[in-house]
Image (cartoon, grey):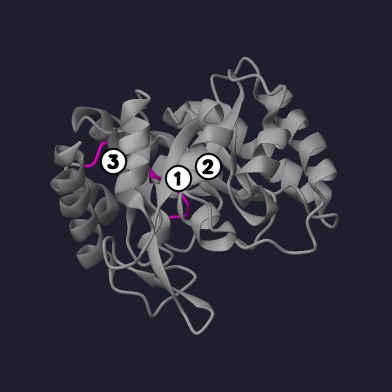
Amino acid sequence: MKLAFSTLGCPGWSWDEIFATAKDLGMNGIEVRGVANQMFAPQIKAFLGERGEKNLARLKKAGMEIPMLTSGACLGLVDEAEEHIKEAEAYIDFAPSIGASYVRVVVTTNPAPTEEEDLLLAKARYDQLCDYARGKGVAVLIETAGELANSRSMRSFMRGVDPEVGGVLWDLHHPHRFYGESVEKTYDNIGEWVRYMHVKDSVLHEGKVEYRMMGYGDVPVMDALQILNHNGYDGYVTLEWLKRWNPDLQEPGIVFAHFASYMNYLKNQL
């Protein structure tokens, strides 16, 4: 298993700071969801022109990569359909230029299930994007969020998807927190499609989710690692620390270092 963190966790950092931290912590990769004030990956200056070539060369020399571009494309919302499709297509087109294998999409902006999601519409759009990705060396991963955090719903959603161009981003937190699923149940339903994992920890306090550093909540991270390891998973386990959306969360330097130490400890127990 490989380790990475998402740039969502360090909204105030430059690319140089992100790269240096990931290198120092021994990360295998850096998941890109915005750098500083630019959220739209194809316009992040650190990846463009001669500067981009130098930064990608530095990544390669350090033995790291950008495994995934995390788009904000929401496929299950009726409004702004064309805008979301265009964003996802732009990410799919851009991903090969920086060596990213995956582009993430979601069914809704809310990690918890809502009544605004249209899964039939989302499925049609997802199939459209998978077809668009064909031949580009990129797979479109749909996240276990919203109604698709229910692994039975995700299983139905993924039937017939070509694994060359599609797959599941298993956000471990959401099926556990919003549907009370065990990792065994989740993996039984969607394991064959899992290509990538997000981890974060939390507790429920007075009915609200409160995020914690790894090991300080009740999300069953070790159980998930054991199942993945048993099934030969060699992909990424990536920290998604929601600092950009929750400024009061702990600072990234502390959280990322703790993540690296904690995850390496768990991996050594496998």
- In front of the other: label 2 or label 3? 2
Answer whether labels 2 and 1 touch (C-beta < 8 Å).
yes
Q: Position of residue 73 (x, y in %)?
A: 67, 49
Q: Which mark is residue 183?
A: 1
**Residue labelled with disc 2:** 186
Q: Position of residue 222 (x, y in %)?
A: 29, 47
62 sits left or right of 161 in the view: left
- Number of dots carrying numbers: 3
Identify the amino acid type marked 2: Thr
Sequence order check: which comes first, mark 2 or mark 3? 3
26 sits left or right of 225 in the view: left
Q: In which image quadrant can residue 269 be found? A: top left
Q: Secondary structure at mark 3?
A: strand
Sequence order check: which comes first, mark 3 or mark 1? 3
Q: Is residue 33 magenta?
A: yes
Q: Is residue 36 magenta?
A: no
Q: Secondary structure at mark 1?
A: helix
- In front of the other: label 3 or label 1? 1
**Residue labelled with disc 3:** 3
Q: Which residues are magenta?
A: 27-35
Q: Secondary structure at mark 2?
A: helix
Identify the amino acid type marked 3: Leu
Q: Is residue 55 visible?
A: no
Outermost residue, bottom side: 206
Local crowd at mark 1 within 10 Å, few (<14), some, or many (≥20)? many
Identify the amino acid type marked 1: Val
